[in-house]
Image (tube, rainbow, N blue to C red):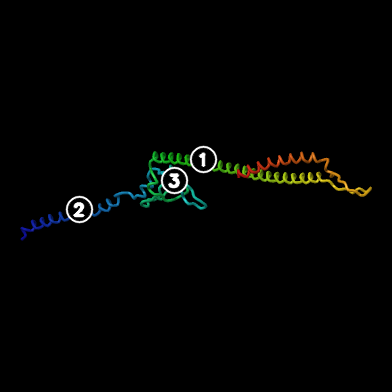
């Protein structure tokens, strides 16, 4: 048994060494695995926050105290946080959320979007100016028409008043002519108190009254034609 001891001892040593090697290899694997998992990839937020400048490619309106503030395409923004299908961004002193399709990192795309927006705004301004011009022109035409209507009404009123006045004058002259044509009985105080007739005191003016009547009737006929024409044009 003594002769066999060294072999037995050597065999034990040989068996121990592989066990130690296997233990050390297992320990190395257990130590390295967490390190690899921890350095797999950076977080999305960190990548976005440290990326190149971002720009809006669509118009964005933001509700602020007292109103609404608009940011045009091409506005440079800073990405603060990735929220999935949306981004939390900042422009100047404003923080707000936008869709990812409203943002680009490409300056050329942002510049093109800004140019398109400028052309659109220019066309919109031209359209608004044209509409305002048409509205102003329509308002002027309406004012002119109102003035014409007012003038026509005033003219019609004046014609009516003129016609009535001529009718009154015609009536008065006819009355005077009738009076001038009368003869008044006068009782003679001598003899048998015979009665004779004397002309009216207007009798000497009878030719003048008849001439005046002719003029008045002519004016009245002209006023009547003008009045009827004005009434048809209303």
User: Which residue appears at 46% of the width and 48% of the height?
Assistant: 61
Query: Which image quarter: residue 116?
Result: top left
Label 1 to label 2, Cα distance in Å? Answer: 84 Å
Mark 1 touching mark 2, by CB under 8 A? no
User: Which quarter of the image is occupied by the C terminus?
Assistant: top right
Question: Which sits in the foreground, 53 or 177?
Answer: 177
Which numbered disc, 2 or 3, marks the residue that appears first in the sequence? 2
Q: Secondary structure at mark 3?
A: loop
The residue that disc 3 covers is 59
The residue that disc 2 covers is 25
Answer left or right for 47 relative to 208. Answer: left
Tag nearer the camera, 2 or 3:
3
Q: Secondary structure at mark 1?
A: helix
Please, which residue is most extreme toward the right here?
190
Q: Position of residue 34 (x, y in %)?
A: 27, 53
Mark 2 touching mark 3, by CB under 8 A? no
Which numbered disc, 1 or 3, marks the residue that appears first in the sequence? 3
The residue that disc 1 covers is 130
Answer left or right for 225 relative to 66. Answer: right
User: Which quarter of the image is occupied by the N terminus?
Assistant: bottom left
Q: Position of residue 97 (x, y in %)?
A: 42, 51
């Amino acid at each position: 048994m003594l002769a066999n001891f060294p072999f037995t001892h050597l065999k034990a040593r040989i068996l121990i060494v592989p066990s130690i090697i296997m233990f050390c290899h297992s320990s190395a694997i257990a130590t390295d695995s967490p390190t690899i998992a921890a350095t797999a990839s950076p977080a999305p937020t960190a990548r976005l926050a440290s990326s190149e400048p971002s720009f809006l490619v669509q118009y964005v309106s933001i509700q602020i105290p007292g109103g609404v503030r608009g940011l045009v395409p091409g506005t440079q923004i800073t990405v603060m946080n990735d929220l999935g299908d949306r981004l939390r961004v900042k422009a100047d002193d404003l923080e707000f959320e936008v869709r990812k399709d409203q943002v680009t990192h490409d300056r050329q795309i942002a510049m093109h979007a800004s140019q398109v927006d400028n052309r659109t705004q220019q066309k919109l301004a031209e359209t608004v100016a044209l509409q305002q011009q048409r509205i102003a022109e329509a308002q002027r035409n309406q004012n002119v028409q109102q003035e014409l209507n007012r003038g026509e009404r005033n003219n019609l009123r004046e014609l009516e008043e003129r016609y009535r006045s001529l009718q009154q004058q015609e009536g008065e002259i006819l009355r005077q002519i009738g009076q001038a044509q009368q003869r008044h009985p006068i009782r003679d105080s001598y003899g048998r108190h015979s009665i004779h007739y004397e002309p009216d005191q207007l009798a000497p003016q009878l030719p003048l009254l008849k001439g005046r009547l002719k003029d008045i009737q002519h004016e009245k006929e002209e006023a009547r034609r003008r009045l009827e024409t004005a009434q048809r044009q209303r």
